[in-house]
Amino acid sequence: MADIKSPCILVCAIDMKSGYCFGCGRTRDEIAGWLAMSPLERDTVMAELPARLETVERRPRRETRRARLARQRAEGQ
């Protein structure tokens, strides 16, 4: 079975104003239906996520998994 790409960074909370997850930028329906989506549908949603994340009202207070991994790669760990 192939791995399914996911934008999840384990910061799971929905911005009530935009309706997007603070961590990944997906909607509740997209999160719930992620495994049932086709690879093309997932890629389409993933392409929209950076712009969506710009619209959320607040940012996570703790270091996210994505940020931690990027920092560790930059530090050469």
Image (tube, rainbow, N blue to C red):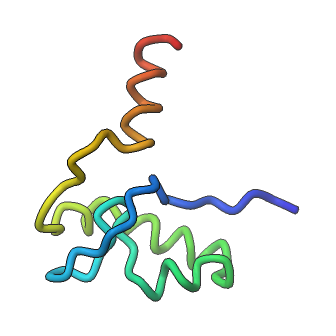
Q: Residue at x 46, y 65 (%)?
A: 46
Residue 36 located left or right of residue 18: right
Q: Residue at x 39, y 65 (%)?
A: 12
- Front one among 10 and 38: 10
**Vertical order, 66 against 59 (above or below):** above
Looking at the picture, does residue 29 appear above or below residue 40? Answer: below
In the rendered image of this protein, does residue 5 appear above or below residue 76?
below
Q: Quadrant of residue 54?
A: bottom left
**Name of the residue lying farthest toward the front:** 62
| Residue at the outermost right position | 1
**Count of numbered circles on the image:** 0
Residue at 54% x, 83% y is 32
Q: Position of residue 45 (x, y in %)?
A: 46, 73
Q: Position of residue 38 (x, y in %)?
A: 67, 80
Quadrant for the N terminus, please.
bottom right
Q: Furthest-top residue in view?
A: 76
**Residue depicted at 67% across the width and 77% down the height:** 35
- 1 on left or right of 71: right
> Quadrant of the rendered structure where residue 22 is?
bottom left
Horizontal and vertical percent for residue 76? Answer: 49, 11
